[in-house]
Image: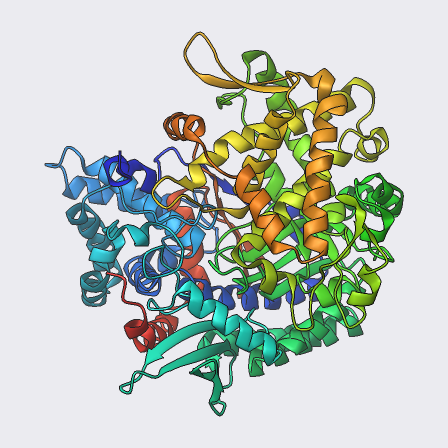
Amino acid sequence: MSAIANKSLYEIPLETGIVNLICAKAFEGLSDTEKKYATFIAGASWKGALICLFQTSPESPYIFAMLRYAFNFAYEAENFSQSDDIDSVGKEFKTSFLAASSNDTNAEESYNQVMIYIASFFANLGNYKSFGDTKFVPACSRDDFQKIIEAAATRSNTLEKVKALWEKVSSPMFALEPSRIRSIGFGPKEGLSTYFSSNCTKEDAEKCQRFLDQNKISAYNTRLFKIMNDDNKTTFHIKVASAMASTREPIEFEGAEFVVITGDHAAFMQKAVALLREAAKVGANKMQESMLNLYAECFEKGDLQKHIEGSRSWIKDKGPAVESYIGFIESYQDPFGTRGEWEGFVAVVNRETSAKFQTLVDAAESFLPLLPWPESFEKDKFQRPDFTSLEVLAFGSSGIPAGINIPNYNEVRQVDGFKNVSLGNVLASAYKPKKSEAVTFIQDEDVELYQTLVTEAFEVQVGLHELLGHGSGKMFMGDDAAEIVSNIDNPLNKEKKVELYYKTGETYDSKFGSMGSSYEECRAECVGMSLCPNKTVLKIFGHEGQNADDICYINWLHMARAGILALLFWSPETKRWGQAHMQARFAILQCMLEAGNDFVSVEKNDKNETYLKMDRSKIESIGKPAVDQFLLRIQVYKATANFEAASEMYNKYTNVNERFQELRNEVIARRKPRKMFVQPNLLYSEEKKTIVLEEYAPTSMGIIQSFMARYRLEEMDEILKQADAEANHHQYY
C-alpha cells in the first residue's frame, strides 16, 4: 500500500488535542522590570520565529501570509480577553459560515478540518510536522478550503490579497506528489529541505562542510544554495543569517566556487536585534546585559563566535528569575545535521521544583562513575550546570520540547559547561494522559499504573537525559588528542589502545552528520535508563519504596512503548527515519528485545492487538546490563570519532524488519495525535498601563487568534519579499 493510498497519514485528525501553556501564575509573580525583560525577549523570539517558515518548505511563507490576511478579523475583534467568552469570535464565525452553507451537508466537517489544519500550520510554523518531519495536508477538498478562507477574508476586507496567494499555494498545499515532498530530506530524490536549494545533493552538502571546516566557519546559522553558471561552473552561496548584508570574495575549493553572503532573513533578524538591545537595558545583571548584546551582535553581523561568547555569559548567569535562550539551536530538521533551526524562549523559574533538580546536580559527580565507561572516557571535570524547572511564557520555534540541554557548542560544553532546563508546564499539559484516554500497546493490567505515574516517570527520565545524558562523556579532540589516546585502553578491545580521535577542524556534527542528532539522543536516553533504577536517584525526585520501583518500571515500559510508537516515523518508501528521538527509542526497544531471557516481548492479546510484556523483576538483572553494554559502545564510538563503527551498529539497531513493518500498520491504525499548544502573548495594555499576559481558548481559533495578535499585517510584506526572492531556488513541484 502506497503512502498516497493511506492519505490519512498526512492529515491532522479532528480529535487532536489543543492545550493551554499555563503560565499566568508564574508571570504574575514577576516584578514590573522582569515582566518588561521577558516581554522584549519573547518579542525577539517570535519575530525570529518567522525564519522557521523559510526553514520548512517553499510554500510555508506564502501560506502563512495568506492565513494572516484571511483571519485578520480575529485579531481586530479580540479585546485583550475582556469578554466573558474568549472564544466568542470563533463561535460566531463558525455559526455564520454554516448558516451560509446550509445546503452543504458536509459543511461542518469541512470547517473543522480546515481549522485544525490552520491551527497545526501555525503550531508547527509550516506545513511539515516539527516532530516527525513529514508533510501534512488539509483533509477537506480544495474547494471547501477555499470557501472558508475566502469567507474569513471577506470579513477581514483582504479578499483580493487572499485570492492572489491562494492561486500560488493551493497546489503545493495539497500536493503529496512527487514522493520526495512528503518528508524532509536531500534532493534530488530523498526529500525536501529549504536549508538547501532543491538542486543540492548530499554530496554537495559534504563538500560544503569540508569548505566550512577548512575555513573555520560554522554551519549553524547558514543555508546552502547551488547555482549552475552558463559555463557549467558550480557556485555555492553560503547564506548567513544576519541583519546586515554583505558578500565576500569568492573562494575556489574542490573545483567549485564558494561565496559567503550575509543578510539571510535580514528583516526578521533586524527586529530580533532591536528587541534584544532593549531587553539588555533592563537585564537583572551584567551577565544578562552581556549575553543579550552578544546575541544581538551575532544576529546583526552573522558572526557566530559572538553567539558562542554570549552562551558563555549565559552559563554564568546562575539562578535567574527569568530564563531565556535564543538563536539557531537544534539541527534535527537539517537532513545533513549541522544547521540549526531558529529557537527562542523565555520562561519563569519554578524555584520549588528546581530545588530537586539542583539536588540532582549536587549529586551528579557521584553518579557518573556508575555509567558503563571507564574514567578515561569521562570529562576531566564535570561542569556543574544550572538545572531548573521552567514555566514557559513563550517558545518561538516549530515545536516545544519537554527538556533542553544547551548550548550545543562542544567547545563551550567541554570547557564552560551547560544548562539544563525541564519545561514543567509543558510536561504537565502535554504528557499527562487523561483517564479517559486509551493507552495503546501495553497490558491491560499496566494501564492504570501507567496513567497515574507516566508524567512523574518521564520527569525523572528528562532530568537524567538532559543532565547526565547530554552532560556526560568525553570526546578526544584537540591538538594533543593523538598523544592522549595512545595511552588509553580501548574498552571494547582490552588488547588495543584507542587509535581514533577528532582531527583538527573536525567536530561531532561534521563527523557524524545526519545520524548525529539521533545517535546523541539515543546515548542520552540510555543514560537515563541506566541510572533510573538507582534508589538514590529516585529519592532525589521524591520516590521511595514501592513508589520508586513503580516509577522505574513505568519509565522503562514507557521507553519500550515509545519504541513501538516510533514506527509511525519510519518511511517504508525511503527506508528512512523522520524523527531523531523516535529513531533512538526504537533502537533502545531493539536492545531490550535482544537482551532475551523473557525480559521484554511483543505479543498479541485476545483482541489480536499487539502489546508489550515486560518482566519488571528483570530490569536490573537483564535489562540494565544490556542497555549498559549498548551505551558503552555508543560512547566509545562517539568519543573516538569512529563514525564507521557507530553507523554500522546504529543501522543494525534501527533497521525495521518485516515483522515491525507489519506492526507499523497497526501503529498507524491505533495512533493518537500529538497535542498542540496555544501559547499566550505578552502585550502592553493601554487600559491597565502595564504588560498583560494575553491568553486564548484551547481551540483551533484560539491558536489562530494568538498568531493574529503576534504578527501585524505589514510584516507579511517582508515575508513575501523574501519568499519571492528565493523562489527560483526551490523547485520541487
Q: Which residue is at 33% across, 64% downward?
A: 58
Residue 309's place in the image compared with 374, above or below, is below
The residue most toward the left is: 103
Residue 690 visible in the displayed image: no
Residue 517's place in the image compared with 275, above or below, is above
* Quadrant for the C terminus in the image: bottom left
Q: Provide residue 38's location: percent of width, then percent of height.
A: 64, 63
**Number of marks:** 0
Give the quarter of the image for residue 650: top right
The residue most toward the front is: 495
Q: Provide residue 158's location: percent of width, then percent of height.
A: 24, 65
Q: Is residue 155 left or right of residue 21?
A: left
Q: Is residue 152 left or right of residue 430?
A: left
Q: State the residue in front, 358 or 1.
A: 1
Q: Is residue 286 left or right of residue 12?
A: right
Q: Which residue is at 49% across, 73% downward?
A: 208
Q: How is the image coloured?
A: rainbow
* Quadrant for the N terminus in the image: top left
Q: State the residue in front, 673 or 85.
A: 673
The residue most toward the bottom is: 249
Q: State the residue in front, 444 or 568.
A: 568
Residue 257's place in the image compared with 353, above or below, is below
Q: State the residue in front, 432 or 711.
A: 432
Q: Provide residue 541's location: percent of width, then percent of height.
A: 79, 34
Give the quarter of the image for residue 475: bottom right
Residue 651 visible in the displayed image: yes
Q: Provide residue 69's location: percent of width, then percent of height.
A: 30, 63
